[in-house]
Image (tube, rainbow, N blue to C red):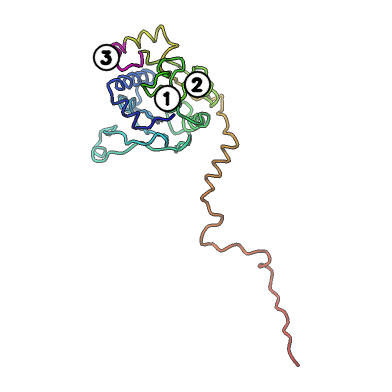
Amino acid sequence: MWLDARSLEAFYATPWGTLVGGSLAGYVQTLWGSLAQQHLLAIGYPFPVLDRLDPAPEQCFVAMPQRMGNVSWPAEPLHETPESRAHRCNRTLMVKGAALPFRDSSLDRILLLHQMEFSNDIPALTSELYRVLHDQGEVLMIVPNRAGLWSRSERSPFGYGQPFTPGQINAQLKGAGFETLTLHGGLYFPPRNSRLVRRHARRWDQLGGRWAKLVAGVMIVQARKAKARRPRKVEHQDALRRIRGLLAGVPLRPEGLAPEPSASALRPHKEKPRMTRK
């Protein structure tokens, strides 16, 4: 079941959602540090993390699935310049399927939040991630943990879609040509919107990271392209489907050009002798 952008926006606007977004942003900041000189692509609904990154990346774009919908971001320019104050540039784009409109090896980092659990074709998605990342590029995925309480509760967005185990997410990354660097747990406090939980959430996160790693609400997976491996090839059916889609609107012959003459038309024409009456 997909969650649309409005549902996710409504959750992260609540005090409980603000707490969750702050925790997720802290994990990303700890693993990646400063992104000031990086070209970042975020996929899914990553705004709770992007709005808290300090300093902001040099270039940042957000790709949102078509089924999720699209929202305008950012509310304020990422970098204050005279031009940015006068014109606010929208950095979100809507994508259909797994295809990403970026050149090969053009990105430094990719962040996925509320994307993997809703994806209908994970092999195609991870292959696209491999394609657009450069050789030292990294991907950071935040996915629901199948063994955690958050994937079993519908009170948060992490209770929807497909949860993962560490072995499952590692297998998907390995098959696409990535090597897993680190796998951290997060959101160890209960999935309940109460003052008691919000008051002691940071303490529960600290204790859970030491003693209860297997029951984390989410997994934060950091991976890098492996030079010795190659991504899995897209299946023939998927390749044929893409080619047919590209050729669907292409005419067989460009307009304005006359059809090529046939072989019979190229032969010299011999006039028949006329019959005359005597």
Task: Say if 246 sits above or below 190 in the image.
Answer: below
User: Residue 179, image x and y in percent?
Assistant: 51, 21
Task: Mark 2 vs mark 1: give the one in front.
Answer: 1
What's the residue at 32%, 29% (across, down)?
Answer: 9
Left or right? Give the position of 263 relative to 46.
right
Taking depth in this image into account, of 153 and 241 the one nearest to the observer is: 153
**Number of numbered discs present?**
3
**Which residue matches tag 1?**
160
Task: Say if 145 sits above or below 101 in the image.
Answer: above
Left or right? Give the position of 131 relative to 91.
right
Disc 2 to disc 1: CB gap under 8 Å: no
**Which residue matches tag 3?**
195
Q: Residues within 10 Å of mark 2 (few under 14, many from 20)?
A: some
**Amino acid type, label 3:** Arg
User: Residue 226, image x and y in percent?
Assistant: 52, 24
**Regarding mark 2 in the picture, which secondary structure is present there?**
helix
Q: Which of pointers 3 and 1 lies earlier in the amino acid sequence?
A: 1
Taking depth in this image into account, of 69 and 74 the one nearest to the observer is: 69
Taking depth in this image into account, of 27 and 55 the one nearest to the observer is: 27
- Say which quarter of the image contains residue 190: top left
